[in-house]
Image: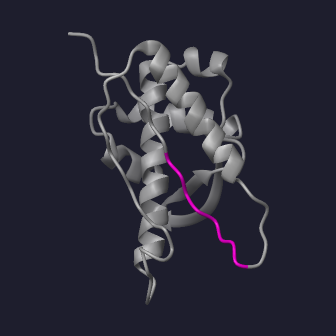
Amino acid sequence: MTSKQVAEAMPEVAQATLYRHIKILHESGILEVVGRRQARGVVESTFALKKGAAHLTREQFAEMSPEEHKTCLAILQVDALTALSRYVDQPAYDTTNEGMTYLAANVMLTDEESRTLRLDLLEVVRRHSRRPSEGRRLRHVTISLIPEAIP
C-alpha cells in the first residue's frame, strides 16, 4: 500500500502525522518498500509488512501513541484488503474448498477473559504456522481485539 492509500483509509489522521508514523514503521523494520513509481514528479513508495517483523513486544505496544495505534491498524487492514484483492481477482477461486473467510464479532468479556482470548488466538496461529511445502500456500490472518470505549 502507498502512503496515499493509508491516508485515504484514515482521513481523521493529519497527513503529516500519518507520514511520520509510516516513516517510523519503515525505519524500525516493520514496513518495507516493495515498489516505487514516479507520480507527478514525486517518487511514490509502496509499502508492505515485512515478514516476521509485525510483532511488537507488549512494552512497545503499550508505549504507542493513539495515532501510532491507528496507523498500525490501518496498515494491517490495507494489507488484508490487498491480499483479498489478489485472491478474488484471480481467474478462478473457491472460497469453500480453499478455506477463505472473514469474520467480525462483538463479544462480552471481562479484561481477564479478553487477555485469555488474545493468548488463545496467538496460540492457534502459532500452532497452525507451518513451513512452506507441497500443497501449502500462504494464508493471511488479521486479528484485532479492541475493547469498546468507556462512556
Point out the image quarter for the C terminus.
Answer: top left
The answer to whether residue 64 of the structure is visible from this angle is: yes
For residue 137, side relative to residue 90 (left or right):
right
Residue at image position (51%, 74%) is 98
Q: Residue at x 48, y 77 (%)?
A: 97
Residue furthest to the bottom: 91
Q: Horizontally, is 8 left or right of 21 in the view?
A: left
Residue 39 is inside the magenta segment: no
Give the magenta-colored segment's residue range: 135-142
From the top left corner, tell me how far across and down residue 117 is, in percent. 51, 29
Give the residue displayed 36% in from the left and 44% down from the top. Answer: 7
Question: Residue 136: which quarter of the image?
Answer: bottom right
**20 sits to left or right of 67:** right
The image quarter containing residue 122 is top right
Magenta stretch: dominant secondary structure? loop
Where residue 94 sits in the image (x, y, percent)? 43, 80
Give percent across and percent down for residue 64: 54, 19
